[in-house]
Each structure stands twice: as structure tokens, then as C-alpha cells.
Amino acid sequence: MNSMLLRPYRKNLTTHGLIYLAGEEQPITIKNISITGVLAQLNSKVGKNDIKTIFNTLLGSTVIDLYLPEMRLAGEVEVIRVDMEDDHIMLALEFKNVTYDINDLLYKRKAYRKNLPGPGHILLNGTYLEYSAVNVSVDGIMIRLAESVNVEPGTVTVFEFKRLELEGEIKVVWVEHLSEGGTLMGLQYVHMEKSTVKGIPEFARLQTA
């Protein structure tokens, strides 16, 4: 059987975005895209030390964050191949947990939100409650509580999230009570350095000329 029949169709195009790799946001140019992934080129030329750093990073995890504002795509991709071409690194990226934002909310937000489940604790109404994180950004965190909790937006309290070693004061921005009895909350960091949110890209809106 012809192997080309088994390979997803790839459309050549040029669009720009960002990936979070080796602890930094790296500008990229997308060369082609298919229903399963993209081929991306790192815009900056790299030397031997840069290549070594990238490969060492991928040894720890091949899953990285991707943001393509022009295509309204954001989320996690897996690096399945790395090549060199004219002093640029080419990355074959496979979609893992990518969202298409039909309402353009990602483009309007101040910071990218990374899906990052994990347990934590928050002090509400005098009691420490356990929550499960839904997503995290450099500005705040969205959590889900198993119980229905009444708290006023604007309330400032304390929290901890061990997965990212975060703790400090946080403000309740919004509250949503779920039909099944749980509670969703949007929380904004108050007294905590944003630089301590390690491993979470900001993916600020790309500037265009």
C-alpha cells in the first residue's frame, strides 16, 4: 500500500507563533500543518550550546506548550522529531491537548492558561478546603471544589498549590456554582511574585507591524 495514503494531508503555509521550550518563550514560524500536527521552525539561529540545551530539555519531557494566535490555537504538543536546516532548528510537533478558540478569547486574554490538574488547598469561610486545579496562568488559577461554597468575589484569602510550589494571597475574581453541587472559581494572585510560576508561559499577544 502506498505510504502516502496513510499520512495526513499537510498544507504548506506561513504563520507565526510561540512555543515554551527550555524555560523560555521561543518565536516560531509554522511551515506546514495537518490534522495531527505542525512543522515549526525556531526563528532564531542556534549554536551548539543552544542545540544541547534543547535536547537536554526534551530528555526531561517531549511535551511543550504552543500558541498560534493567527490560527487561534493553543495548548500542548509533543515533539516527535528535531532536525537542523540552514542554522535553524525544525520541530515536528504532534497535537496533544490543543484548543481552537472560536470566540477569540485566547487572543484577548492577557496570559495563556495551561491545563494543569492537581490538588491544592484554599482558606474559605474559616476552613481550609481541598480543590482541584483546572488551569493555571502567570496571573492566576482556576479551581474546582467538590462542595458548593458561597464566597463573595473580591474576597482575598490564602492558598497553596504544591505541583508548582505556589502559595500566598489570592483574590476571588468570580464564582460559579455547578448543577452537580461543585463550585468553580477564578482566582488572581495578590502577594506572590509572578516569576515564581515556573513552567507556565505567558504567551503575551504577539506584536505585529
Image: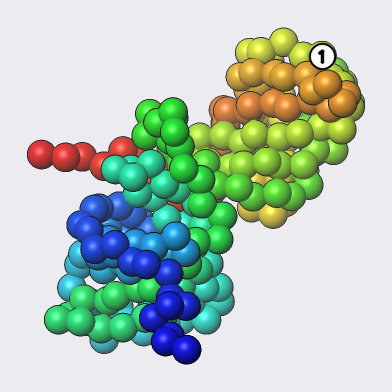
Residue closest to the eye, 170 or 141: 141
- Residue lying farthest to the front in this orientation: 1
**Residue at the image point whose x is 20% and y is 82% from the top:** 85
- Residue lying farthest to the bottom in this orientation: 1
Residue 127's image quarter? Answer: top right
Counting from the top left corner in percent of width and height, residue 98 is at 51, 51
**Residue at the image point whose x is 55% and y is 61% from the top:** 96
Check disc 1 and give the amino acid type: Asn
Residue bearing mark 1: 150
Inspect this view and state whether residue 38 appears. no
**Residue at the image point whose x is 38% and y is 73% from the top:** 92
CA neighbours of label 1 inside 10 A, class few (<14), some (14 to 19), many (20+): few
Q: Please, is residue 88 above or below residue 196 in the view?
A: below
Q: Please, is residue 176 above or below residue 33 in the view?
A: above
Q: Secondary structure at mark 1?
A: loop
Q: Is residue 168 left or right of residue 11?
A: right
